[in-house]
Image (cartoon, coloured by chain):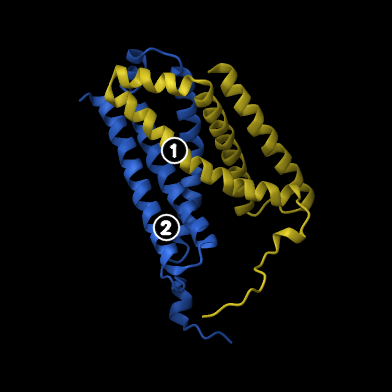
Amino acid sequence: MSLVTPLKKAQGLGSAQHGVHHWWMQRLTAIALIPLTLWVVYVVVAMSGAPYAEVLEYFQSPFNIAMFTLFVFTAFYHAALGLQVVIEDYIHKEGFKIAALVGMKFFLALTGATSIFAILRAAFGS
Amino acid sequence: MKTSNRPLSPHLSVYKPQITSTLSILHRITGIVLAVGSILVVYWLAAIATGPEAYAQASSLLGSWFGQFILFGWTLALFYHLCNGIRHLVWDSGYGYELSEAYLSGKIVVGAAIVLTILVWLIA
């Protein structure tokens, strides 16, 4: 016998009220990162060793700007989801755990935003 | 709640390391390595955005033997996590759960990660 009400069961959101959102976003970002990563690696390999002016040229292509921006956003989102699980698995003191989770998300938001603004600045000049 | 010194599951020390368990924890370790290494990505992009001098400085830092060593490790972690991530996505769609398949896909992932890493470093 289940103590869960029929409505709760139908909604399928569980005790955290988020349902499978975390699991699903982890997979969705993973799938998106396959082509994004391959493209970014390809471009970085192509520009390795090139002089500054030439490197800057790679950031003038609208497609490259889009791919780099999407890569950074998706990768940092994926990292935040992954590190969240790692912290939840290994840090058992409630206070430390929440502090680590908040600190990790703030740090990734800051570095992710910095990366995207850097891409846009390289693209549009300062 | 007071918890005694009971041993915590999953009692890692009583198991012999196997390719399945080793690759599983490697997926998590490379994930953490990539997240920490993303600081390099921010640094590199910020240097490009800042100007030629900052870019030259970043290039010489990343071009030093220590920078290359870190970058090589980061590339290997990236390709391992990418390949093993695809392996996980295959499992998520319900395939490859037989032990023989899991061993085979594990070996393919390790091989592909090494080959891709060497390929990128030969071209770049």
Chain in blue, by letter, is A
Q: Which residue is mark 2?
A: A100
Residue A18 at what x, y percent from top left?
Answer: 42, 66
Q: Which residue is mark 1?
A: B38
In the image, B28: left or right of A39?
A: right
Lateral position of residue B91 relative to residue A105, left or right? right
Q: Which mark is drawn over residue B65?
A: none
Give the number of the mark in front: 1 or 2: 2
Under mark 2, the amino acid is: Ala
Is residue A124 toward the left or the right of residue B72 in the image?
left
Mark 1 and mark 2: span between their CA atoms? Answer: 18 Å
Q: Is residue B93 above or below residue B124?
A: below
Determine if residue A113 is in view. Answer: yes
Which residue of the protein is positioned furthest toward the front in this rendering? B5
In-front residue for pair A13/B84: B84
Q: Residue at x 43, y 63 (%)?
A: A96
Work out whether A23 lies above or below B80: below
The three-letter amino acid code for the residue at tag 1 is: Ser
The quarter of the rendered structure image containing the C terminus of chain A is top left
